[in-house]
Image (cartoon, coloured by chain):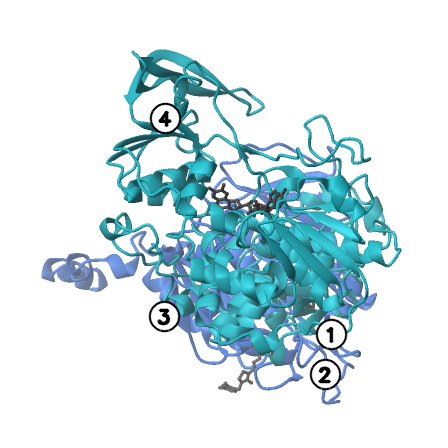
Chain colours: A blue, B cyan
């Protein structure tokens, strides 16, 4: 069993604006099961951060409990991180984000972590519009505890042990759309061509971004009857539009025929370039997105891609009118401005 | 693009860069692993079977394997493959019990070998166990060819050479030493079923520039001078020596001259220092011994004044390369006179066949080389075969050995009345899984990042004082074991099975070297019809090394194919460890008949 990966790398891999190659964005070697979809998500995060030239030390990786929540250990080992309690990543992320609004917050959770024990936390962090990327690795089970059905499992499926899913499944994308998330997408761990641009756009998005990533649990939910197995997903996945991320500094050359393309400008000037596959596809109406998701589900298909994006979104700091300076950088002078200011405040209440 | 044919060993052998580069296809990683286990005798025997002279080659081989070593593509220096071979030779036990048995009942076929160099001796070694009678003719009193007459003892001790020659001679060679073959016609009339010519390239080239005739007493070819030193006819040298040429012969000449007491030894070569033909380590050793190497000088005249030999005059030149990389030498206008008492000319060697009559049906080409079938080494006289330097001009020991194997196969086929070209045996092969447990391999799969170890040597001051003291000391056990860990086990292959892959991308995600790719074939379901450009444009690292192999799978369930770029694979086994279905396995290549793989 190998515990480390060779530090040798391909002599011709590219470096980014910081002079780093993608290997510099890796973490320790995964201890998840061989073939776990979560490892592919890890590698998509690595690739996205490398391509965006994100300085690793300006990232905070936040997670709860589960195999998926272990994943942050396997990417960006030079970033900050907090592996919190089961289902409580949103609170801890909120606290961290309050203290330092300058970091990039990457939340990594599971469908058990977010749709069961942490559902309340999840709802409120969406509602709060925290400026973060919230990823859920959706495998339909509690992988870490050996494959019990998760609340996302489709009604009527059985897990590997034969347990029948009796209740309606929770679709976290639909919830996120209802609760006001300003960037919502679904993707598949096995489709990095789709996933990497989505992660890059979500990181660039200033607001709450949610990506639900179908991520097969190869050990406990890859059997014949599963609707989250590699084979099932490969066969039933469909996409409404292909989204490419065009960073701000890159010269924009359109490679899609006129009419089919749509560019959405993000806060930092980068673009989300959309190539429609379904004619009625659009990214501006959350309610329509909910209908589409449900419609495809009824047909037995899994709709993926960018569902909704509000490029003019605001986030928690803006809504609350907090100061621009991250709280953790405020000096004692600013935090304790002295008795004169205190008197002024007190007087304002008289 | 084609799905890779994995039904023969060819793809896999090419991936083992060192083994592929070795003319005799020595299973390098296999013997290095045995050294790592301190199984020196086994390591020696693996070598002996393919390269016949491991103790000799562990010291003086030209090492085509080392520049080929995959390690130079991922870090600075190759594994010290040659030095490790010597470790096996130095530390082995008695190997006589493991030598092939020679049948007492002969097969009735008699083969004559001319010359007792490495080429002929390899033929002898391969044919004796098959029951052939081997009759060897050598003009010198001892076997070894240029390994004895040319390669100085400070690089190759006589005891090492004798030991390895005796393994073969003691297998029952009928040796006729001191017997020069002066007529092939006569030999053809003697009762031999086949004749192998391994007479080397014995003629040193002269430089016929002005003064060549008058200066002849002060000028000698390097190779005749070196053999006269070896055989004790020369034991002194004047004070000031000039060596002309930049190959290994020049290096042996200058270092030998220094040992005989020359005070001022200068090597002048017309190429640049970097372009000199000598192996880099030979140049470095010569410099360490205080030899002055002057590149970019071409000799124009032997200077003689009043019947006195003064020295050699040179024109300074510059190497200029055209866009095809072809070199021309342009004179700078400067000249240089180097005064000296002795000139050793080491500018090349030629074959010499005055003893082969031109009316016996053996065809020669326009360069006066025998016309040979490259695959069989058979000449236009069907019972006469050539190998080693005699066949294609001066090469090196390991090429002579490889030719010996090739010729032995041909001779064996010929003596059985078979077609030497069409009926050549094809080697069988096996791929043996190295799996020991779910995530455990029978080889050291983790990668060692250490730099190459330097081989210890005696002090340079001591070295130049003695003609026969070996300069290199070889690796001790500690260094050997460390160096062995640097090998990347390239013979333990990543073998892919399309039918079990579920396309989870675990292997391509984990690979530290970006070898593995799952690509879309476009609008076709046939790999053959896919646009190669379209496939290659999807690789993780698009700039591929054209000299290296791609492993291309058949279409998978989704229609994608797997393309593995073998170029910089570390054989670390992570892909196979992370594959949930065992679609990758680490399997060791075992070739049944290495001789038959030499083409
Ligand atoms: C100075 C020098 C240094 C070298 N150093 C190296 C080195 O470090 N590493 C390396 O790999 N290679 C080296 N080589 C090259 C290597 O020695 C030869 O390539 C190799 O020995 C060729 O082997 P062979 O069997 O073809 O012939 P040879 O070794 O040349 O043997 C031919 C034999 O045939 C005998 N012979 C010739 N004609 C007749 C005849 N008519 N009748 C009977 N006998 C005959 C000769 O006496 C000789 O013994 C060196 C060569 C030279 C000149
Ligand atoms: C408070 C608490 N309750 C229950 C558990 C047991 N537990 C650990 S992981 C897990 C479910 C994880 O499922 P998910 O988030 O889907 O992650 P996966 O392993 O599937 O990636 C549970 C219930 C716990 N660790 N803590
Ligand atoms: S149990 Fe499932 S989710 Fe956890 S590591 Fe294994 S495959 Fe991945
Ligand atoms: S053995 Fe597998 S993981 Fe390791 S370098 Fe080679 S292809 Fe990559
Ligand atoms: S890890 Fe195995 S199953 Fe997964 S993609 Fe690679 S070869 Fe296929
Ligand atoms: Mg889960």
Residue position for label 3: B478
Of A211 and A319, which appears nearest the observer? A211
Residue position for label 2: A167
**Residue B377 drawn at (x, y percent):** 74, 45
> Mark 2 or 4, which is nearer the eye?
4
Q: Chain of mark 4?
A: B
> Mark 1 or 2, which is nearer the eye?
1
- C-alpha span from label 1 to label 3: 44 Å
Q: Is residue B415 left or right of residue B349?
A: right
Q: Residues within 10 Å of mark 4 (few under 14, many from 20)?
A: some
- C-alpha span from label 1 to label 2: 85 Å
**Residue B190 drawn at (x, y percent):** 78, 50
Identify the element where label 4 is drawn: helix
Identify the element where label 3 is drawn: helix
- As drawn, A260 above or below B60: above
Say if labels 2 and 4 share a chain.
Answer: no
Mark 1–mark 2 contact, CB under 8 Å? no
> Image quarter for residue B185?
top right
> Mark 4 or 3, which is nearer the eye?
4
Say if labels 4 and 3 share a chain.
Answer: yes
User: Can residue B581 be spotted in the picture?
Assistant: yes
Residue position for label 1: B104
Identify the element where label 1 is drawn: loop
- C-alpha span from label 4 to label 3: 48 Å
Q: Residues within 10 Å of mark 3 (few under 14, many from 20)?
A: few
- C-alpha span from label 2 to label 4: 104 Å
- As drawn, A183 above or below A261: below
Marking on residue B218? 4
User: Can residue B515 be spotted in the picture?
Assistant: no
- C-alpha span from label 1 to label 4: 54 Å
Q: Chain of mark 1?
A: B
> Image quarter for residue B292?
top left
């Amino acid at each position: 069993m190998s515990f480390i990966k060779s530090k040798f790398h391909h002599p011709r891999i590219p470096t980014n604006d910081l002079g780093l190659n993608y290997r510099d964005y890796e973490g320790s070697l995964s201890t998840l099961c061989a073939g776990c979809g979560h490892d592919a998500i890890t590698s998509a995060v690595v690739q996205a951060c490398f391509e965006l030239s994100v300085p690793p030390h300006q990232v905070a990786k936040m997670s709860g409990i589960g195999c998926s929540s272990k994943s942050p250990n396997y990417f960006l080992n030079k970033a900050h991180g907090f592996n919190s309690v089961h289902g409580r990543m949103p609170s801890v992320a909120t606290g961290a984000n309050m203290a330092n609004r300058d970091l990039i917050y990457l939340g990594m959770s599971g469908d058990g972590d977010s749709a069961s024990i942490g559902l309340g936390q999840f709802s409120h962090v969406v509602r709060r519009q925290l400026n973060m990327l919230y990823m859920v690795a959706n495998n339909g089970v509690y992988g870490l505890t050996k494959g019990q059905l998760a609340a996302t499992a489709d009604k009527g499926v059985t897990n590997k042990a034969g347990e029948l899913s009796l209740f309606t499944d929770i679709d976290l994308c639909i919830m996120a759309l209802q609760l006001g998330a300003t960037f919502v997408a679904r993707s598949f761990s096995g489709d990095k061509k789709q996933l990497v641009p989505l992660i890059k756009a979500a990181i660039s998005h200033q607001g709450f971004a949610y990506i639900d990533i179908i991520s097969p649990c190869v050990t406990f939910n890859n059997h014949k009857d599963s609707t989250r197995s590699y084979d099932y997903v490969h066969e039933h996945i469909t996409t409404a539009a292909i989204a490419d991320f065009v960073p701000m500094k890159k010269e924009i050359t359109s490679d899609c025929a006129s009419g089919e393309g749509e560019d959405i400008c993000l806060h930092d000037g980068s673009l989300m370039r959309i190539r429609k596959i379904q004619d009625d596809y659009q990214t501006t109406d959350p309610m329509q997105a909910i209908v589409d998701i449900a419609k495809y589900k009824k047909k037995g298909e899994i709709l993926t891609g960018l569902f909704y994006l509000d490029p003019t979104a605001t986030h928690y700091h803006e809504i609350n009118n907090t100061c621009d300076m991250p709280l953790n950088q405020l000096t004692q002078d600013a935090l304790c401005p002295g008795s004169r200011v205190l008197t002024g405040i007190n007087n304002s209440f008289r | 693009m084609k799905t890779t044919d994995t039904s023969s060993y060819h793809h896999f052998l090419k991936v083992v860069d060192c083994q592929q580069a070795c003319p005799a296809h020595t299973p390098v990683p296999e013997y290095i692993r045995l050294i790592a286990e301190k199984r020196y005798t086994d390591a020696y025997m693996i070598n002996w079977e393919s390269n016949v002279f491991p103790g000799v080659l562990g010291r003086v081989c030209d090492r085509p394997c080392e520049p080929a070593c995959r390690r130079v593509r991922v870090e600075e220096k190759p594994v010290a493959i040659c030095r490790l071979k010597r470790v096996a030779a130095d530390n082995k036990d008695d190997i006589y019990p493991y030598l092939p048995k020679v049948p007492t009942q002969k097969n009735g076929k008699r083969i004559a070998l001319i010359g007792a160099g490495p080429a002929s001796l390899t033929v002898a070694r391969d044919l004796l166990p098959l029951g052939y009678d081997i009759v060897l003719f050598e003009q010198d009193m001892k076997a070894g060819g240029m390994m004895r007459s040319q390669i100085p003892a400070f690089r190759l001790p006589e005891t090492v050479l004798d030991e390895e020659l005796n393994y073969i001679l003691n297998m029952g060679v009928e040796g006729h030493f001191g017997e020069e073959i002066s007529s092939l016609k006569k030999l053809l009339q003697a009762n031999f079923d086949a004749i192998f010519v391994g007479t080397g390239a014995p003629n040193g080239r002269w430089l016929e520039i002005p003064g060549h005739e008058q200066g002849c007493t002060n000028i000698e070819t390097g190779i005749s001078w070196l053999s006269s030193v070896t055989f004790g006819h020369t034991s002194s040298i004047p004070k000031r020596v000039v060596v002309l040429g930049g190959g290994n012969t020049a290096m042996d000449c200058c270092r030998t001259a220094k040992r005989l007491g020359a005070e001022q030894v200068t090597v002048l070569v017309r190429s640049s220092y970097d372009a000199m033909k000598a192996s880099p380590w030979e140049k470095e050793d010569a410099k360490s011994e205080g030899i002055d190497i002057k590149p970019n000088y071409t000799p124009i005249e032997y200077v003689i004044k009043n019947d006195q030999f003064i020295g050699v005059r040179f024109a300074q030149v510059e190497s200029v390369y055209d866009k095809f990389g072809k070199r021309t030498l342009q004179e700078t206008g400067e000249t240089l006179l180097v005064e000296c008492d002795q000139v050793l000319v080491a500018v090349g060697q030629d074959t010499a066949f005055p003893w082969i009559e031109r009316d016996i049906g053996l065809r020669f080409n326009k360069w006066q080389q025998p016309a040979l079938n490259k695959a069989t080494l058979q000449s236009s006289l069907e019972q006469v075969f050539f190998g080693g330097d005699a066949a294609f001009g001066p090469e090196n020991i390991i090429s002579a050995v490889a030719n010996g194997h090739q010729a032995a196969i041909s001779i064996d086929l010929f003596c059985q009345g078979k077609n030497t070209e069409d009926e050549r045996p094809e080697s069988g092969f096996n791929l043996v899984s190295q799996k020991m447990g779910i995530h455990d391999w029978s080889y050291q799969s983790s990668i060692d990042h250490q730099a190459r170890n330097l081989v210890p040597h005696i002090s340079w001051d001591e070295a130049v004082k003695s003609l026969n003291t070996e300069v290199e000391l070889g690796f001790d056990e500690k260094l050997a074991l460390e160096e062995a860990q640097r090998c990347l086990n390239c013979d333990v292959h990543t073998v892919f099975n399309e039918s079990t892959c579920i396309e989870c991308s675990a292997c391509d995600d984990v690979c530290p070297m970006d070898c593995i790719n799952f690509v879309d074939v476009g609008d076709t379901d046939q790999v053959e019809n896919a646009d190669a450009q379209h496939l290659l444009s999807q690789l993780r690292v698009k700039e591929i090394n054209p000299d290296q192999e791609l492993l291309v799978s058949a279409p998978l369930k989704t229609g994608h194919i797997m393309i593995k770029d073998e170029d910089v694979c570390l054989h670390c086994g992570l892909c196979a460890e992370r594959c949930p279905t065992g679609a990758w396995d680490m399997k060791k290549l075992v070739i049944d008949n290495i001789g038959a793989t030499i083409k």
